[in-house]
Amino acid sequence: MGIFLKNKNYRKFTIASWLSGAGNILFYLALMTYASKLQNYSLALSLIAITESLPDLIQSLSGYLADRTHNKYRVIVWLAIIRFALYMLVGILFAININGWNLVLIVIGLNFISDLSGMYSGGLQTPLIVGLVGENEMAEAQGFTSGISQLIILAAQFIGSGLLLFMSYSELAIVNALTFLAAGLIFANIGSKVRKQHIQKEEVNDQNFFATIKSSLKQVRQAHGLLTIVLVVALLNGLLSSIEPLISIVIAGHKSMLIGNYSFTIALLGAAAAIGLASGSAIGTKLLKNVSLFQLSLLSTVNSAVMAIAILNKNIVFCLVLMSTLGFFAGTSSPKLMQWLVVSVDRKILASSAGLLNTILTIAGPVMTTFFTSIAGTINVNYALYGVLGLSVIVFTTTLLVMIKVNKIKQAELA
């Protein structure tokens, strides 16, 4: 927190990021609530979940394009203005009250364009933060930002469910638009000061995309066992990403699972996951210091399987508990994985290798979410949950076999 208080430009930069993130959460909850009232709500909620996760598939490409972008501050400001205009249009569309399904499809499309812009903007921000705080302070800055972001997401979900009681969908869309406008103005202010003070020198990557990926992949594969556990953790991330939209579909069709109303129940599920992730990152690594990534993966797969069973049995209280523990395991696994990367890979290509691993981890989420929600939307949500249960068993078995093999190799090396 010290760097946040001491570094004025970084403080402004972080606040701008938090503003746009909070606005997004508010509107996402509103869109999910509106879609849940449509006749074919299962398909509508599935489409929203798919389009929300698809931009993650091109994270490595957007990051590469961001590295090649000149005048990064200027581009970030324009992206914020574009997103402001998109959600003002969404607000107008809700206000004129066109046909429900036509409205949802148009808004999903506009929201998708905004998410693509946000992914590109996030890639642009990473090197700028390094320039503002310095390489030695990057870990502290990122840790603080991530921790507060989880709290903001948690607060925004509850605030959003409350605002829906007395604000219209149109008004919430306009609030979201204004957060992007405010963020854009802050970014413009920082960019102006940075240019005048010559605080940082902009670096632009001149290596082509495939050469960059090839170099990173080569180094990662040389780290014994690292790529294997990344693939396992990727599958677990995919299961975690798939469960939340599936349970939102089940809740929409079974009012007995509601706690208060639909939006508040979804907010509670998001809060449970956020609390688990935050606590896992903060204290999980200390509590489970001697627990390996393989053991954590086994615990996570058991949790996922039990979660699917709880959803099938419509037990919302048990679902909340399991969502929190699943988030806890995920929050604990991430720093352990990064620690393994840091001690295993040449520091000169650490950033590229981390980007590659994050891409692998990220891709699993939208792919599996798309797969399972498509089954839920076109066939039946129960079949999707059976799929989650089956995949959990497969991942558990695979992880156990790999763990036994790696332990044998380590014992042989020590002998």
Image: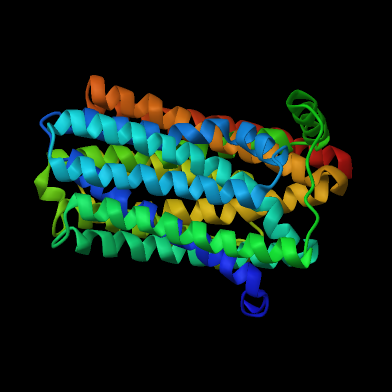
Q: Nearer the viewer, residue 99 or 185?
A: 185
**Residue 239 x %, y %:** 44, 37
Question: For this rendering, which residue is in front, 294 or 348?
Answer: 348
Q: Position of residue 151 (x, y in %)?
A: 43, 66
Q: Residue at 49% of width from left, 34% of height from top?
A: 55
Quick one: 128 or 187, which is closer to the camera?
187
The residue lying toward the viewer, choosing from 304 and 371, is 371
Q: Viewed as shown, does residue 208 lie left or right of 265? A: right
Residue 1 higher or lower than 129, as above or below = below
**Residue at x 79% of width, y 38% of height:** 205
In the image, residue 103 sits, relative to residue 265, either above or below, namely above
Q: In this view, does 337 lie to the left or right of 248?
A: right
x then y, percent, for residue 51: 38, 32
Q: Quadrant of residue 363?
A: top right
Please give the name of the residue rendered at 76% of the width and 68% of the height, measured from the top-left corner. Answer: 197
Q: In this view, does 268 lie above or below 390?
A: below
Q: Is residue 414 visible?
A: yes
- Viewer can see residue 46: no
- Residue 2, x across and y down, in percent: 65, 79
Q: Which quadrant would the C terminus be assigned to in this image?
A: top right
| Relative horizontal placement of residue 332, taking residue 138 as reference (left or right) | left
Q: In which quarter of the image is the N terminus?
A: bottom right
